[in-house]
Amino acid sequence: MHDRTGYEVGYDDAGDVQIIEGAAREDVPELTGSELQGGDGMGCHAGASEMKAAARAAGKSDILDQYAADYPQGPHDKPQSMCPAFGSLRVGLRMRRTATVLSGSACCVYGLTFVSHFYGARRSVGYVPFNSETLVTGKLFEDIREAVHDLADPALYDSIVVTNLCVPTASGVPLRLLPDEINGVRIVGIDVPGFGIPTHAEAKDVLAGAMLNYARKEIEAGPVQAPAGGKSDRPTVTLLGEMFPADPMVIGQMLEPLGLAAGPVVPAREWRELYAALDCGAVAAIHPFYTASMREFTAAGRPIIGSAPVGADGVANWLSDIGDAFGIAAEKVANAQNMFVGATKGALAGSQIKGTITLSGYEGSELLVARLLIESGADVPYCGTACPKTPQSEWDRQWLEAHGCKVVYRASLEDDLSAMEGVKPDLAIGTTPVVQKAKELGIPSLYYTNLISARPLMGPAGAGSLAQVINAAMSNKDRMAKMKDFFEGVGHGDTAGVWEGDPNLRPDFRAQHQKKLDKQARAAAAANMI
């Protein structure tokens, strides 16, 4: 070991390496935000407006216009949630005999694959890397096409999904020029840019809609595969939106007295399920934001039914709408309503929730959960969803507002936090930052995605599914207060922790950095005006 000035410990001769030092130049101007992204400003951290403009210039206007119509952003620039491409990636990874290939910045692909495997993906994600040269020259598209040809083995796959992330979309990589099929393997190319798709929930619809479009054209062209379990001898209702595995079975039980059966769930788990989904009598939009998918069902002549059989009122309304869609006799519908509405009320009576709850999330089922909580006895003054307002959620909105709940579509994090801080509920249900803030305030909280949406909701089985976990969480209020008192005075944010003296905040550094940010913002605004 060497004893060298400036080195506490040395294990080798690395400290002896000569460092080449250059002289600082005084004539170099300060770079603007656009220049820091790369010569054209189109690096993976370029602003959404710059990337959107580049995508339009590269020939992606039709796709962006369709996304803007399908997934309107509303009053907020963009809700705060995870990368939207996670939604479409998750749909592809859950399908049997389907390969998934991503084209995007390496950091994005790493994050998406990490999250996917964290949530239980058990297969590899393909990745086609690129650099500035292959992106600009078009070599990236050639690399994608070569990768797809290498993957297209009909013994292994029914389909291959290729997804453009932000940078390839902004650069106009033309996935539409990929062949529709190779060796009998279907090729589905989609663009899922963060500047065009507001939430990961809606990105599920992007892929589901693209697959339904492909399957519908196959049906129009000639005979297709029958469902693995055979074709139902009764008219079916296709269920649109991811849900707890037991929910389709419960819905099937409610449909049986009407002479109907539950059809496949879309997003599907196997390609041939798409044919059965299109071969239905009606579509139940359990999640009401699957706009592209509903467009395909409408093109196939299938009626769309909104809301879901959640809670006693929801069961009665939904069964009535199903009866109307299929032209079922009113007496038959009434008998089914009496059977399942009564059972749902009984389950609700035995699973009461007493307390005030604020609810928010980005999965798309928030309004359904809010209705169930209110029918369970809870006071829910606020329900925020990152998803948009659609005709299929209108009955839910009207019901909630009639019961004193404010519904906010495209809710931002600030909306959710403001509601929680203003109401000071007995329980806050929300996204990770909402739960974090609630715990800081000593308010019991539950993460919506893992602890609430991953539970049965439909009919009598779903009526009592939330009470146990919610009542248990609300009973922790005293414990949360004790924890808050215990940690009182340890600081907040960048002053968190135990300090021997006062934290060195250096407001002069903050002011200097803020000036740089303001200067960059003025430069960007001036560039946009040119």
Image (cartoon, helix red, strand yellow):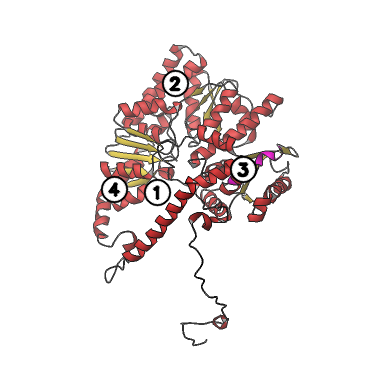
Q: Main secondary structure of the magenta part?
A: loop
- Per the image, the residue denoted by label 2 is 319
| Dot in front, 4 or 2 | 4
Which of 324/131 is in front? Answer: 131
Q: Which residue type does callout 3 highlight?
A: Ala
Q: Is residue 167 above or below residue 248?
A: below
Identified at 34% across, 61% down, the residue is: 511
- Per the image, the residue denoted by label 1 is 432
Quadrant in the picture for residue 319: top left
SS for dot 3: loop
Which of 47/379 is in front? Answer: 47
Q: Earlier in the sequence, mark 4 or mark 1?
A: 1
In this rendering, does residue 206 appear at all?
Answer: yes
- Cα–Cα gap, marks 4 and 1: 14 Å
Neighbourhood count class around disc 4 (C-alpha, 10 Å): few under 14, some 14–19, many 20 upward:
many
Which of 94/229 is in front? Answer: 94
Q: Earlier in the sequence, mark 3 or mark 4?
A: 3
With 178 as the anchor, is 277 left or right in this view?
left
Magenta-drawn stretch contains 174? yes
Magenta-drawn stretch contains 11? no
Report the disc number at residue 58: 3
Q: Is residue 506 above or below residue 298?
A: below
Q: Which residue type does callout 4 highlight?
A: Ile
- Cα–Cα gap, marks 4 and 2: 38 Å
Identified at 63% across, 55% down, the residue is: 132
- Cα–Cα gap, marks 2 and 1: 35 Å
Identified at 49% across, 14% down, the residue is: 328
